[in-house]
Structure formats: C-alpha cells, structure tokens
Amino acid sequence: MRTTSRGQLIINPGAVGQPYSLWPKFFADQRAHYALLEIDDFGRVDVSFRKVEYDRQKEIALAQQRHVPYSSQYAFLRESGSTITHDRDLLAQVNAAHDYVDRVARYYHKH
C-alpha cells in the first residue's frame, strides 16, 4: 500500500495465481493474498491484508483441464513458489512449441 505523488491511494493485495515479492520470505508464502478495504462515513480508510490457504494441486488440475496457456510453467510456479516468467529463452521455446504468438495475433485480429 502506498500513495502517489498526487495523493492517490494504491493498494496491491497480492495474488492467488502468482504471488511476487522481492523479499524471499514473502515470496515463499504461497497462500492466496487479498485485501479488505473499509471506508467509514468520514472517508477514513482502513486496509486489512489477508492470506488464506487453498488446494494448489486442485488449482493446477483446473488450469490443465481448462487448457490455460503456459500450464506447465504455472504448475511449476504453484508447486515450487519459483517464478520463471522472466526466463526469455524458456518462454520463447514454450511459445514456439504451442504457437502462442500466432494464436494471440489471430485472437486479436478476430476481435
């Protein structure tokens, strides 16, 4: 949570699918992250950050069942807590193997 130079409040509660932090101890926490935002009648803000456990194996199976792109990389992330989203060589191989670049181009060309 932070404010911008113009005084706007920015809240990033985290994620279910890909938590990220520069701090290894925070990144290792694979629970789902979310935030509750309460604003009272006077405009005062209270933010509570929460974390809950969930069945990661069930999540992986659902992603595979729905043919989510990059599902094997997603499974690796969910099982290990380690991200590979910045591994350009690996992503290039995966993109080529699954024709992702052309599939995205065709999708946006239709819509």
Image (tube, rainbow, N blue to C red):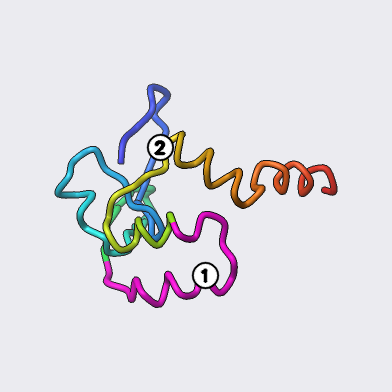
Residue 54: horizontal and vertical position, in percent?
32, 73
In the rendered structure, does residue 60 fall within the stretch colored magenta?
Answer: yes
In the rendered structure, does residue 67 fall within the stretch colored magenta?
Answer: yes
Residue on which the image places disc 1:
64
Q: Mark 2 belongs to which amino acid?
A: Asp
Residue 17: horizontal and vertical position, in percent?
41, 58
The magenta region covers: 52-72
Please report whichever mark, 1 or 2, sits nearer to the chain's N-terminal start.
1
Q: Foreground: 62 or 96?
A: 96
Q: Is residue 2 left or right of residue 28?
A: right
Which residue is the extreme one toward the top?
Answer: 5
Compared with 4, 80 (above or below) is: below
Q: Foreground: 5 or 109?
A: 109
Compared with 74, 91 (above or below) is: above
How crowded pointer 2 is (Cα within 10 Å; few <14, some 14-19, many 20+) is rated as few
Residue 48: horizontal and vertical position, in percent?
27, 57
**Residue at point 40%, 62% (across, down):** 75
Residue 40, image quadrant: bottom left
Residue 81, image quadrant: bottom left
Residue on which the image places disc 2:
87
**Residue at point 43%, 58% (across, down):** 74
Q: Foreground: 3 or 98?
A: 98
- Under tag 2, what secondary structure? loop
- Under tag 1, what secondary structure? helix
**Residue at point 61%, 43% (across, down):** 96
Disc marking residue 106: none
